[in-house]
Image (cartoon, rainbow, N blue to C red):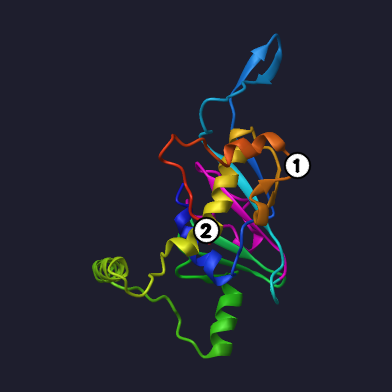
């Protein structure tokens, strides 16, 4: 899964670990007589899924839900697209007063329908397109230089491991929900514990071999 695309979303909305996660994995069926029955799969992850992450309110931000679609699954096509289809990948932000479509990493964001985008540009005196792109080679070179500098004790990069904790918590919990067939999990981040499905907690930790234990305190 390319969930790294959600890194800007976690940063901009200042998301902590989710308080609840539930998934809808795809599955295969077989016939039991004339009735279709689900084939239980406890050895591999599904070919496709959707995952819902619930985040608590924080500061001035209200609670929000984040939906992840994987394996060619997509959300319902919004009416605001006016007959068009959703792209194979991208982001959609749904707010109280409208919707925004963007690319895989949130780039080239556009209010839908197009009429609202034109009205917004006109009100803000913006040019016809506000998309800004950096040459990929230049961006990649700068990212590598920043990473090397951070490794040498310099300023942390935007990809600092400490900043990855919330998104890592979220998708690890999503993986646990999928592993349990789509169970809804309620998560207590402070105690690193699933509170409603006790058997899920064994998937959050592992037994380390002697000499390889983790002894550092959690930041």
Nearest the eye: 78 or 24: 24
Q: Which residue sits at x=49%, y=66%? A: 8
In the picture shown, does residue 74 fall above or below 34? below
In the picture shown, does residue 21 fall above or below 95? above
Q: Which residue sits at x=36%, y=75%? A: 155
Separation (CA) of disc 1 from disc 2: 22 Å
Q: Which mark is residue 179?
A: none
Farthest residue in the right direction?
196
Q: Quadrant of residue 158?
A: bottom left
Q: State which tag comes first along the sequence, 1 or 2.
A: 2
**Callout 1 environment at 10 Å: few (<14), some (14 to 19), or many (20+)?**
some
Q: Are marks 1 and 2 in contact (CB under 8 Å)?
A: no
Q: Which residue sits at x=53%, y=38%? A: 48
Nearest the eye: 89 or 186: 186
In the picture shown, does residue 152 fall above or below 23? below
Nearest the eye: 202 or 104: 202
**Callout 2 environment at 10 Å: few (<14), some (14 to 19), or many (20+)?**
few
Q: Position of residue 93 (x, y in %)?
A: 60, 65
Q: Position of residue 182 (x, y in %)?
A: 65, 37
Q: Which residue sits at x=49%, y=87%? A: 126
Q: Which mark is residue 196?
A: 1
Position of 48 with respect to 137 (left or right) is right
Position of 187 with respect to 3 (left or right) is right
Farthest residue in the top direction?
33
Q: Which mark is residue 165?
A: 2
In the picture shown, does residue 111 fall above or below 29? below
Nearest the eye: 131 or 193: 193
Start and end of the magenta stretch? Answer: 62-88
Q: Position of residue 109 (x, y in %)?
A: 50, 70
């Amino acid at each position: 899964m390319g969930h790294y695309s959600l890194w800007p979303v976690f940063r901009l909305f200042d998301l902590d670990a989710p308080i609840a996660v539930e998934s809808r994995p795809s599955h295969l069926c077989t016939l039991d007589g004339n009735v279709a029955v689900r084939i239980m799969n406890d050895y591999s992850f599904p070919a496709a899924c959707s995952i819902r992450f619930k985040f608590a309110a924080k500061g001035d931000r209200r609670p929000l839900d984040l939906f992840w679609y994987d394996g060619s699954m997509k959300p319902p096509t919004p009416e605001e697209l006016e007959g068009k289809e959703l792209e194979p990948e991208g982001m959609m932000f749904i707010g109280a007063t409208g919707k925004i479509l963007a690319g895989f990493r949130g780039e080239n964001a556009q209010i839908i329908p197009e009429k609202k985008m034109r009205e917004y540009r006109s009100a803000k005196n913006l040019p016809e397109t506000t998309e800004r792109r950096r040459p990929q080679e230049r961006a990649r070179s700068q990212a590598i230089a920043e990473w090397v500098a951070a490794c040498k004790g310099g300023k942390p990069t935007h990809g600092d491991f400490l900043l990855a904790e919330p998104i890592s918590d979220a998708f690890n919990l999503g993986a646990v929900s999928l592993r349990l067939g789509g169970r809804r999990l309620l998560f207590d981040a402070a105690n690193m514990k699933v509170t409603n499905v006790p058997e899920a907690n064994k998937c959050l930790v592992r037994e380390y071999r002697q000499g390889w234990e983790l002894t550092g305190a959690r930041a």
